[in-house]
Amino acid sequence: MNPGMSEEVGQTARSFVTAMSSVPMALALVVSNVALLAFVWFTQYENNKAWVSNNSQRTEVIQRILQSGQDTQQLLAKCAVPADHK
């Protein structure tokens, strides 16, 4: 009878814990690396949510800046004096 998936995973986990019990510093390092990965994933997830929620506000600000530049160009075009005018 072949062992099932859960039995294989359990056996692997038991052998990992047995190997790490002889070197507790390595186990602590593995745990801290997993915690660091979880922290980095969470911060990136939160940053992505903030970026998506502020994206419409950024788009509106960019459109206002561009519109202001166009308005300024139109005003300056009306104020330009031709070179031959004295």
Image (cartoon, helix red, strand yellow):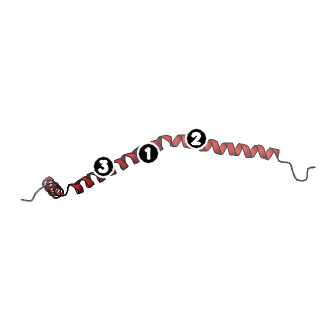
Q: Between disc 2 and disc 1, whose residue precedes?
A: 1
Residue topped by disc 1 = 47
Name the kind of residue labelled 3 in the image: Ala
Q: In the rendered image of this protein, does residue 49 appear above or below residue 11?
A: above
23 vs 69, nearest the viewer = 23
Q: Nearer the viewer, mark 2 or mark 3?
A: 3
Kind of residue indicated by mark 2: Glu
Percent x, y of residue 76: 78, 45
Q: Nearer the viewer, mark 3 or mark 1?
A: 3
The residue under label 2 is: 60
Position of residue 55 measured from the top left corner of the image (x, y, whole percent):
51, 43
Kind of residue indicated by mark 1: Asn
Instruction: Identify which residue is drawn at 43% across, 43% down.
Output: 49
| Nearest to the observer: residue 4 or residue 48 | 48
Identify the residue shown where x is 32% and y is 48%.
38
Label 2 and label 3: CA atoms lie apart by: 38 Å
Q: Residues within 10 Å of mark 3 (few under 14, many from 20)?
A: few
| Picture layout, residue 5 above or below residue 67 | below
Q: Earlier in the sequence, mark 3 or mark 1?
A: 3
Check if mark 3's residue and mark 1's residue have beta carbons within 8 Å. Answer: no
